[in-house]
Image: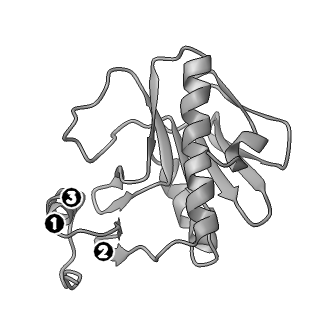
């Protein structure tokens, strides 16, 4: 395994470094962090979320795309996250791109080791990206979704265990159950 760099990086340096260092990482305030291995439950819910987003986009005939984890979202010059799924709208990105500069929806599937970070640093970080209107925190253990959405100058948050999740923009509706279905 390649050791993590000992110097601070900006996002551009990090993206170049990550291309030659296989693995899953995030950059937080200039420091590279290795992402921990996932539980089967986490991976299953992450897959279900991606499939539900993709199906919802097709059903609504939106000019948007859902992507699974692996894409980078730049928060600022020294921080970049890799959400478990995201949605962006508009033209298809270059096939060689590793960064999505303007996601509308980002999703994190909670795990015991990331729960606190996802609910604090990532919550404030994601909403620093002007294009992001929705941040979903999906809890596979409690089968709950916390929907954070941009509301004027603030953020509204709702916790849901059933019913329909309305994500407007871009005009997407998903059942909560679909986020936990086996794909």
Disc ID at residue 32: 2
- Between 120 and 92, the one nearer to me in the picture: 92
- In the rendered image, residue 46, in percent from the top left (x then y), is placed at 57, 54
Query: Which secondary structure, mark 3?
Result: helix
Q: How many angstroms separate mark 3 from mark 2 (CA)?
A: 11 Å
Instruction: Give the quadrant of residue 110.
Output: bottom right
Name above or below for residue 19 compared with residue 173. below
Residue at 32 percent of width and 21 percent of height: 91
Residue at 62 percent of width and 21 percent of height: 171
Dot 3 or dot 2: first in sequence order is 3
- In the rendered image, residue 40, in percent from the top left (x then y), is placed at 59, 68
Instruction: Name the residue carrying label 1.
Output: 17
Residue at 30 percent of width and 75 percent of height: 31
Q: Is residue 169 among the parts visible in the rendering?
A: no
Name above or below for residue 62 compared with residue 176. above
Query: Badge 2: how crowded within 10 Å, few (<14), some, or many (20+)?
Result: many
Q: How many angstroms separate mark 1 from mark 2 (CA)?
A: 10 Å
- In the rendered image, residue 133, in percent from the top left (x then y), is placed at 57, 36
Instruction: Name the residue carrying label 3.
Output: 15
Dot 1 or dot 2: first in sequence order is 1
Name above or below for residue 22 compared with residue 99. below
Q: Are marks 1 and 2 in contact (CB under 8 Å)?
A: yes
């Amino acid at each position: 395994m390649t050791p993590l760099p000992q110097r601070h990086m900006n996002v551009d340096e990090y993206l170049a470094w990550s291309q030659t260092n296989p693995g899953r990482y995030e950059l937080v305030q200039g420091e590279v962090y290795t992402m921990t291995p996932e539980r089967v439950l986490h991976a299953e819910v992450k897959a279900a979320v991606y499939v539900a987003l993709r199906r919802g986009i097709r059903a609504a005939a939106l000019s948007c795309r859902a992507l699974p984890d692996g894409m980078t979202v730049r928060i600022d010059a020294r921080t970049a996250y890799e959400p478990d799924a995201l949605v962006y709208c508009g033209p298809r990105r270059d096939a060689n791109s590793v960064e999505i500069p303007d996601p509308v929806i980002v999703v994190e599937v909670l795990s015991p080791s990331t729960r606190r970070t996802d609910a604090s640093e990532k919550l404030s970080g994601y909403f620093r990206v002007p294009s992001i209107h929705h941040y979903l925190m999906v809890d596979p253990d409690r089968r709950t979704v916390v929907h954070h959405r941009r509301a004027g100058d603030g953020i509204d948050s709702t916790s849901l265990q059933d019913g329909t999740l309305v994500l407007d923009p871009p005009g997407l509706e998903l059942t909560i159950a679909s986020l936990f279905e086996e794909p």
